[in-house]
Amino acid sequence: MSRAGGASSASGLARPLPEPRPDLGLREGYHSPQLPARVRLNTNESPYPPPPEWLEAVVSQARDMAFNRYPDRSARALREALAEWHGVRPEQVFAANGSNEVLQCLCLAYGGPGRAAVLWEPTYALHSHIAHLTGTKVVQGQRRADFSLDLDACRELVSRHRPSLVFLCSPNNPTGLAEAPSTVAAIVAGSEGLVVVDEAYGQFSSWSALGMVGDDVPLVVVRTYSKTWSMAGLRLGYAVGPTAVVQALERVALPYHLDMLKQAAGRLALRFSRQMDQRVEAIIAERERLEAGLAELGAQVWPSQANFVLFRPPGRSGGDVWQALVDRSVLVRDTSRWPGLSGCLRVTVGTPEEDGVFLEALAEVLA
Ligand SMILES: *Cc1c(COP(=O)(O)O)cnc(C)c1O
């Protein structure tokens, strides 16, 4: 047995450690501080646990798993189940450890040095971050003041930079806005590169780009179990797209990246879609209550198609309001210094009780 060294090494090998790549920092202010709080409405998780019957099914299958063996490298059963769920072929489905890993694989396969990715701010910060980490040049367009896309400006940006990747997020995090089908179609039609539509909040929205996916359409839709499925702790996400794109993603994923327990858990979850739908419906109803409560307090509220609401509190600066809420043990996301979001905060839809505590605390802060 050898022990890792303490402050100094007796081996005589001590020297200054090499510096990591200097460009690894996440955009300032992105990380949501993990502060202890009574009510945590900062990371868009579901406030409800997954159905207990699902956990029982997973545990029962786990008993028969051969953990001494590697898992099915192609996650065939999971991909078949997801394909059936979405009405596509298993060859059109790629699964990974959270949709963030799907996005990373997309950047590894289609981005990289000498290539560009285009996206429109404000949007999900990890699109630019992951692209950047893979050496992909990031081109940031801007949304209009109402967070919609100016299609002429989009076309102009895409034809000027000829990106190999174009990121959309619908519904968009952190604005809550879903793109119109015609917008997604226009961007697919106007791009040479692969268009990625991140639908992490897809089931909360009235429209999905999944219907546009086809083997001869340069479009990939990315989904996750983290939000609508109440399974952020599982770390499972997937892409639905052309067979050739899925093959490219398989080439950059690490072998056996999806463990057997997760493959089974994701497949079994699909048997409980009724419970998932119930959770989604409850959250949508609660979202409407939250939006109304915020408007009543004089906040500017952007109508949301997701499980969170972007709002701008009246009178005080967003950062001050965020801190005053933390002081009352309520944690929301401080987006007030993100580009285009000055003064704004983002609150995740919680249980009626949690949202009640949040609204009360906010009323106190604004009084
Ligand atoms: C939460 C979120 C994800 C989720 O990532 P996972 O790695 O699947 O947990 C992906 N995209 C967007 C836009 C999100 O808000």
Image (spheres, helix red, strand yellow):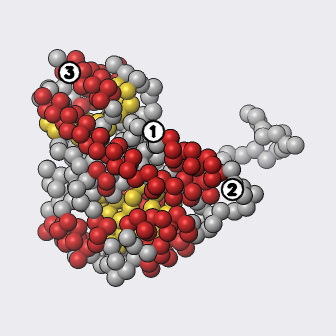
Nearer to me, 277 or 178: 277
Q: Is the residue marked by circle 2 packed among few (<14), some (14-19), or many (20+) residues within 10 Å?
A: few
| Residue type indicated by callout 1 | Pro
**Secondary structure type for disc 3:** helix
Q: Position of residue 182 (x, y in %)?
A: 17, 68
Badge 3: residue crowd in 10 Å (few <14, some 14–19, many ≥20)? some
Q: Is residue 139 visible?
A: no
Q: Is residue 301 left or right of residue 286?
A: left
Q: Residue at x 36, y 36 (%)?
A: 42
Say left or right for 304 vs 258. Answer: left
Disc 3 and disc 1: Cα gap in Å? 29 Å
- Disc 2: which residue: 65
- Real-space CA distance between mark 3 and mark 2, rounded to the nearest whole angstrom: 52 Å
**Circle 1 is placed at which residue position?**
49
Q: Is residue 133 above or below residue 163?
A: above
Frontmost residue, 26 versus 239: 239
Q: Is mark 3 within 8 Å of ligand 1?
A: no
Horizontal arrangement in the rendering, residue 286 relative to residue 327 (left or right) = left
Is label 3 in contact with label 2 (beta carbons under 8 Å)? no
Residue 50 appears in the figure: yes
Q: Picture quarter containing residue 136?
A: bottom left
**Count of residue discs:** 3
- The disc placed on residue 363 is 3
- N-term mark: 3 or 2: 2
Q: Is residue 184 left or right of residue 264?
A: left
Considering the numbered disc 2 on the image, is that residue within a helix, a strand or a loop? loop
At x 28%, y 66%, the residue is 209
* Amino acid type at image mark 2: Met
